Image: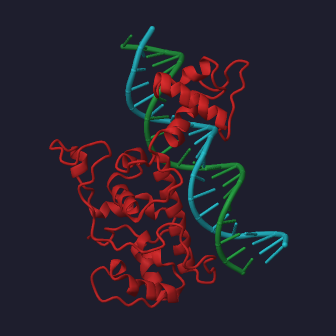
Chain colours: A red, B cyan, C green
Amino acid sequence: MEGGEGAVVMRKGPWMAEEDEILMEYVKKHGPRDWSSIRSKGLLPRTGKSCRLRWVNKLKPNLKTGCKFSPEEERTVIDLQARFGNKWARIATYLPGRTDNDVKNFWSTRQKRLARLLQSSLNPTKSLKKPGKSPVSQELPVIQGTSIGFTPFGEESSKNGQNSEDILFEPSSSIGGSDIMDGFGELSFQDEFAQYEAAHCLQYSEGLPFFGPQDIVKKETRSSGIPSNFFDDLPIDMFGL
DNA sequence: AAAGACTGCAACCGCAATTGA
DNA sequence: ATCAATTGCGGTTGCAGTCTT
């Protein structure tokens, strides 16, 4: 088992450059496997799990570290999360250069923001601290409809033998069951949104106004103090598109 | 300028699945 | 077939940097 390894005290916390070097060297020689032998050989006072995690999330070549998710990547994650649920590792295979941790972090950040926005919209006395500012997608992406036909990174898009699970879509009714709506209390999201709509006197003609012309959305959101990307935070197909 | 709030991210933990002796 | 070791995954936490008031 890993952990209490005899007299050797396992190091925890941030990795040092020297440790990274040793790990890189190890992988170069042996490949990304046998993580536990790194510890057993006395190369690093780190658990195999820790070494693997470090490699996968930071040292692996071609990672987009320190690079924000593009609007396209955001859409991909949102869509795939609706299809697969919180299968971050799987979703990450569709995003070259992104790790499951990246996707997971992106999603939880988004969830927190969503919850806070909803909270503030239902409780206007608690104004937003940073109205209009969003670290993710400053410019509102215009959704062109659900994207279909994602191909996992490394697989050919023209592959005939497509994974059956990639073809099967969850019914839209199941979207509300995903954890995107967790923590929003007893009300359904539609109810919550209806309250928000009433509170902010939103007037929409028909169809899906949220993903319409950016100027319309931005005009309304600016005046209401809700960030322009508020609507981007909603599941793409929550209205059955 | 300072304090507090917020964000993004690295890394840990626990559990499940897989491997192999 | 069994069981310990290893690997992989998802959830969570802690912290440094940034932003707002």
Quarter of the picture holding the C terminus of chain A: bottom left
**Of the pair A234 and B14, the residue shown nearer to us:** A234
Residue B4 percent across, percent down from the top left: 76, 69
Residue A5 percent across, percent down from the top left: 67, 21
Q: Residue at x 56, y 37 (%)?
A: A54
**Of the pair A154 and B17, the residue shown nearer to us:** A154
Residue A138 percent across, percent down from the top left: 48, 72
Badge count:
0
| Residue A204 in view (yes/no) | yes
Quadrant in which residue A82 is drawn: bottom left
Quarter of the picture holding the N terminus of chain A: top right
Quadrant in which residue A209 is drawn: bottom left
**Seen in the image, is A160 located left or right of residue A147?**
left
On screen, residue A41 above or below A144? above
| Residue A1 in view (yes/no) | no
Residue A122 percent across, percent down from the top left: 54, 79
**Seen in the image, is A54 located left or right of residue A221?**
right
**Of the pair A33 and A177, the residue shown nearer to us:** A33
Q: Residue at x 33, y 69 (%)?
A: A238
Residue lying at the far left in this picture: please name it.
A160
Q: Residue at x 65, y 38 (%)?
A: A15
On screen, residue B20 above or below A125? above
Q: Residue at x 21, y 45 (%)?
A: A164
**Of the pair C3 and A126, the residue shown nearer to us:** A126
On screen, residue A31 above or below A154? above
**Seen in the image, is A7 located left or right of residue A81?**
right
